Image (spheres, rainbow, N blue to C red):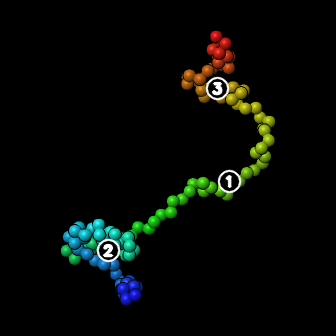
Amino acid sequence: MTSLYYTILSTSIRERPVEINATEFKAKCLKLMDEIAKTRESIIVTKRGRPVAKVIPIEAEEKQSYFGYMAGTITITGDIISPIEEPWAAITGEEDHFYEGMGVAEENGAQDDGEKG
């Protein structure tokens, strides 16, 4: 019970992060990182008495699901179920010039000839 009280008291009294020199940090790096993760307190690394780095605990990020992240961002106007009265350009051949030179069958009959063989 005394150690818990001491831990709470020392945490609330401490206003500044713990400072440690670079040589000591290098020697105890892994142990210090475990301590930072456990206590959630930062450490300032000094070199010749001057602060050069601050080691802080990282906040765990929640993994967000992409499912439904755009919900409510689309507005539907008009009827999206019924077919449109306009003929489809792929059937009428209005967009055939987009596919020239790509090796796509130029005529509908070209596919039928190959199948009849």
Q: Residue at x 27, y 67 (%)?
A: 29
Amino acid type assigned to the residue bearing label 1 in the image: Ile
Residue 35: x and y in percent read 34, 73
Specify which label sits upstream in the sequence, 1 or 3: 1
Residue 56: x and y in percent read 36, 70
Pointer 1: what residue?
A: 74
Tell me the element at label 1.
loop
Mark 2 or 3: the one toward you: 2
Q: Which residue is drawn at 63% across and 20% down?
A: 106
Q: Quadrant of the N terminus?
A: bottom left
Mark 1 or 3: the one toward you: 1
Pointer 2: what residue?
A: 43
Q: Left or right of 96: which side holds 60?
A: left
Q: Give the distance between the C-alpha atoms of the residues marked 2 and 3, in whole angstroms.
A: 67 Å
Q: Tell me, yes or no, if residue 54 can be seen here.
A: no
Q: Give the distance between the C-alpha atoms of the residues marked 1 and 3, in whole angstroms.
A: 32 Å
> Badge 2, how many Cα within 10 Å: few under 14, some, many 20+?
many
The outermost residue toward the top is 117
